[in-house]
Image: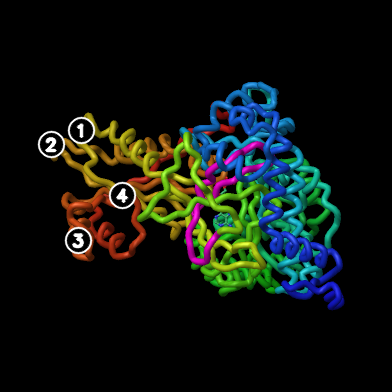
Amino acid sequence: MAVDSATSSPLGPPACEKDSKALQFIEEMTKNCDSVQENVLSEILAQNAGTEYLQQWCLNGATDRKTFKSKVPVITYEDLQPYIQRIANGDRSPILSSHPISEFLTSSGTSAGERKLMPTIAAEMDRRQKLYSLLMPVMNLYVPGLDKGKGLYFLFIKAEAKTPSGLVARPVLTSYYKSQQFKTRPFDPYNVYTSPNETILCVDAFQSMYSQMLCGLVYREEVLRCGAVFASGLVRAIKFLQLNWSQLALDIESGELSSKITDPAIRECISKILKPMPELAMFIREECCEGNWEGIITRIWPNTKYLDVIVTGAMAQYIPILDYYSGNLPQTCTMYASSECYFGLNLTPMVKPSEVSYTIMPNMGYFEFIPHDPSNPVTISRDSPPHLLDLADLELGKEYELVISTYSGLCRYRVGDILQVKGFHNSAPQFKFIRRKNVLLSIESDKTDETELQTAVENASELLKEFNTTVVEYTSYGDTKTIPGHYVIYWELLMKDPTFRPTDEVLDQCCLAMEESLNSVYRQSRVADNSIGPLEIRVVQNGTFEELMDYAISRGASINQYKVPRCISFTPIKELLDSRVISVHFSPTTPHWTAERRF
Ligand code: AMP
């Protein structure tokens, strides 16, 4: 029941007293965006004044924006790497942060093929928790009754590594799910999950998914919302159901958990939930046995009101398949966050994916913006800090690149995200996520750039040398029609001696060689998570790329400036390439990946 109008918020009537406080907090933050930002920067600079990093810029204790902007350079990960390396190697002096670095968060953005390491401090967990605590109060404004059932969320942890000095390095969500804040969260009727903690906290992707799906099926009538962090995760869960429904039904019929699930903590907690339920088993068989997956989400979980998944940015490619699986249920994107910093939330979560905008919460860090206009790029040099804009300076409709300073010690760090101002809530801009810079291919959290793809092609084409063959042109696209999705690379080959062509086996090995060259996030998705399928090379007839150029020129491209696009998405171009394919090759096995990483 909504609380009385005295506590009502401009965002809408809160569902309960706790929500009222959360909505009030959002109002305060967004009304006082600029002064909150000023305070945040001042706190960060005061807290970290004694760090080696800030000392070198001679702020002399100043904590104001003007001094900060005039003295501290705007940087990328490569600039930070020497400091990060020293922390990883065990230097515990205050290098970036005056608070001890509690762990490294490993970003899905990579540097030299490895996940970037983002230092974090213990207090940051509370800040993240605070942002999470705002999500349901906003959702409750739009969807009533979410306290009357459960959320089926497929949540996963990933393997951890240790730095030479013993600091843990793991993805931010693994860190969060393993935290006391998550594991011992107080009961909240609006936030009850079908997945027990034990099923989330198992690093084996199969066992974790199996047990979470099993619980989702057992509680199917109570499920009010289905989700995963990213859309790709929910698509993968449905694919898992397609492959494993028969065994799941068997377990539910017998009340006995499959022997494939060996994790003792999972077995223990499932034993309290699973009992013989023959009618439910029969229902699952009836729904799944014909292989019709249209509307499967609403058939199995009939009370689902919305899908809670990020479908903005690279995830937009999964909107059609989720529409198909769910009979067009609303897809809500609630949050915008990264390993470096959690940024903000969507204050109108029920809008269409194409209209989603995120409101950055000014208490999360200090945010600056580089105007992003490809026809008039801003030059960023370390020696003369450019004038960046503040949250309060941004203009409607314009695009900006995000730069952050955090309590954990990042100072004027370029995240790489391009955002566009779509509106304002009070004085806080609301941003559409436009794209991540330099990402060519992405199936789930992997981010492959043009240089990585080029290197992968070069490495793979080494195998063609003995056949006197070279790759003369190539392009690519991320195929998400297959589940899991996979990279498709088109190759045009020049064979000096057509009677001595590379064999199919060699071209298959080229697929693998490309995968071996790709970054560790890609390889982890292939090996540990099975969330990316084998890489495919499609060899096209000679002359195909010339046709591609002719096509582009016929559509207005300049002949002098024409460059082969290294990634394609336009359907007619894909069709043209596909119509010229002469052979198709897949990676015969998975590439090399281990949880151990280079530091
Ligand atoms: P990571 O560093 O692996 O935590 O990835 C963070 C990045 O994921 C962000 O910088 C964005 O590029 C992307 N991302 C996070 N949240 C969203 C969102 N809601 N919509 C689109 N992209 C997002």
Residue type highlighted by circle 3: Ile
* Residue 340 position by quadrant: top right
Quarter of the image for the C terminus: give it.
top right
* Residue 305 position by quadrant: bottom right
**Residue 13 appears left or right of 373:** right
Q: What residue is shown with label 1? A: 467
Q: How crowded is mark 1: few (under 14 residues within 10 Å), some or many (20 or more)?
A: some
Q: Are dots 4 and 3 in contact, CB under 8 Å?
A: no
Query: Which comes sooner in the sequence, label 2 or label 4?
Result: 4
Residue 388: x and y in percent read 53, 49
Query: Which comes sooner in the sequence, label 1 or label 2?
Result: 1
**Residue 582 appears left or right of 286:** left
Query: Which comes sooner in the sequence, label 4 or label 3?
Result: 4
Q: Which mark is residue 475?
A: 4
Residue 156: x and y in percent read 66, 48
Residue type highlighted by circle 1: Phe
Q: Residue 553 carries which label?
A: 3
In this orientation, which residue lies closer to the viewer: 510 or 243? Answer: 510
Mark 4 to mark 3: distance in Å? 17 Å
Mark 2 to mark 4: distance in Å? 24 Å
Q: Residues within 10 Å of mark 2 (few under 14, many from 20)?
A: few
**Image: magenta residue range:** 394-418
Classify 134 as above or below 474: below
Mark 1 to mark 3: distance in Å? 34 Å
Q: What residue is shown with label 2? A: 497
